[in-house]
Image (cartoon, coloured by chain):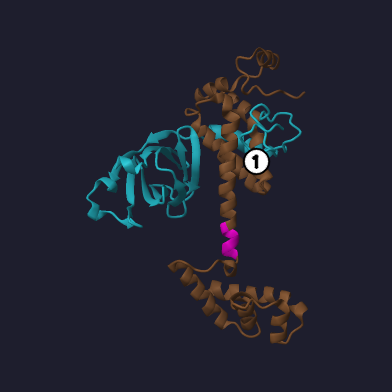
Chain colours: A cyan, B brown
Amino acid sequence: VVNDGQGAADEPSDESVSAEGSHELPAVPPDVSERLRRVFGERRPVVEAQLVTDTSVEPVTTRTRSGGVAAWTMAYAAHGCDVILDIAPIGRNLRLTGQVLTVDQAEDTIVRVFDDDELVAASSTDDVGQFEVGLLAPRNYTVSATTKAIRFEMAVDLRPSAR
Amino acid sequence: VVPVSIERAHGSSKSSQRRGRRHDPANDSLIARCLDGDESAWNRLIDRYERLVYAIPLREGLSRHDAAEVSQSTFESLVESLHRIRDPNRLGHWLMTVARRLTWAKKRSRSRELCSEDLLDQPAPDSAIDWERTTAIYEAILELSEPCRSLIIGLFFDPSEPSYSTIAETLGVNVGTVGPLRGRCLARLRKVLESEW
């Protein structure tokens, strides 16, 4: 195991991350390994959800206020799915919560937030489809909502300057 | 046989030799094949990285069950991101970053579960919900009989934070019985709370 200068000292670098044959890394139980292989066959078709509502561009009287800074809601829709995103500024960051409304599944929809190619946050919905992602920096993201059958993707602009 | 890593190796003659010797396809080739639906390429990526990913939550102290969940979520994220990966040579880092973030999220989630299991260890209330919960706890304590009521108040709500021996003296019991009694009283309190919530 080599310290690559970017991670913790005991983490392997990209020079050594090929785990095959390494005595430093634990063996993956066969059932877990099998699950990981099945992930590929379970990938969902992707549907792009479109922005249908953005309260930040509506008259200010319809918006809520959080600590003197405007919070806003964005709603995305695709066939069979609506995704509501509630954004509340917290300091320089934004707290993202929301709800995924699908015709066949509320619970355990996986919500992921990507910044370019990087996964920055992930969450799953509760029994009524609500989720909480946490704090994000104000920028453009791709948000995906993955149900058992389909994956919805939406381009989300969380820059207050864009509003 | 200990296969070697090919990451960051593209273009270097030494690693090209290694790659040729091992017939180990590069990440960019595997990702491209995955995007074309080639399951064998995916399995090759799993072979290459599953142990690395699985090790991260284990190293952070998560259970094997949670480590399996983190690993699965990490590779599910990869499936969703195959078309976004900008630098296939850094796929190992990409996976490590994702696994680490999911591990932290799992730890936070586990921490919240532990907190909710023992409401009395919650910090001072600062919201309406916490206040409601604290009020419910107080009311439940008042329903307890002695010595549980005095014991719980002494252990968790007395601002002077009396020691076990002081509490034992107040209750007129042996100090050695305070610990077991605490467990029994908390169980009774939990029953009261569960019946009311």
Instruction: Name above or below for residue A92 compared with residue B153.
Output: above
Tell me which corner region of the image, top left, top right, bottom left or bottom right, holds residue A115: top left
Q: Amino acid at mark 1?
A: Ile
Image quarter for residue B92?
A: top right
Is any part of residue B196 visible from this angle? no
Between B197 and A121, the residue placed more toward the observer is A121
Expressed as whole percent of the image width and height from the top left, the position of residue A97 reads 42, 51
Quadrant placement of the N terminus of chain B = top right
Q: Is residue B180 magenta?
A: no
**Label 1 crowd (10 A; few <14 / some 14-19 / many >=20):** many
Q: Which residue occupies 68% across, 44% down?
A: B59
Q: Tell me which secondary structure the magenta stretch mostly adopts.
A: helix
Q: Is residue A78 among the parts visible in the rendering?
A: yes
Q: Residue B155, image x and y in percent?
A: 64, 76
Horizontal side, residue B182 vs residue A80: left or right: right
Tag count: 1
Q: Position of residue B161 (x, y in %)?
A: 64, 76
Seen from the viewer's position, the closer of residues A95 and A6 is A6
- Which residues, given as a range, are shown in magenta? B112-117
Q: Is residue B170 positioned above or below A119 on the image?
A: below
Q: Is residue B113 left or right of residue A54?
A: right
In which image quadrant can residue A6 be found?
top right
Q: Chain of mark 1?
A: B
| Residue indicated by mark 1 | B56
Tell me the SS state at disc 1.
Answer: helix
Residue B64 location, x and y as percent? 68, 46
Q: Residue at x 70, y 17 (%)?
A: B22
Residue in the picture at 63% in, 28% down = A14
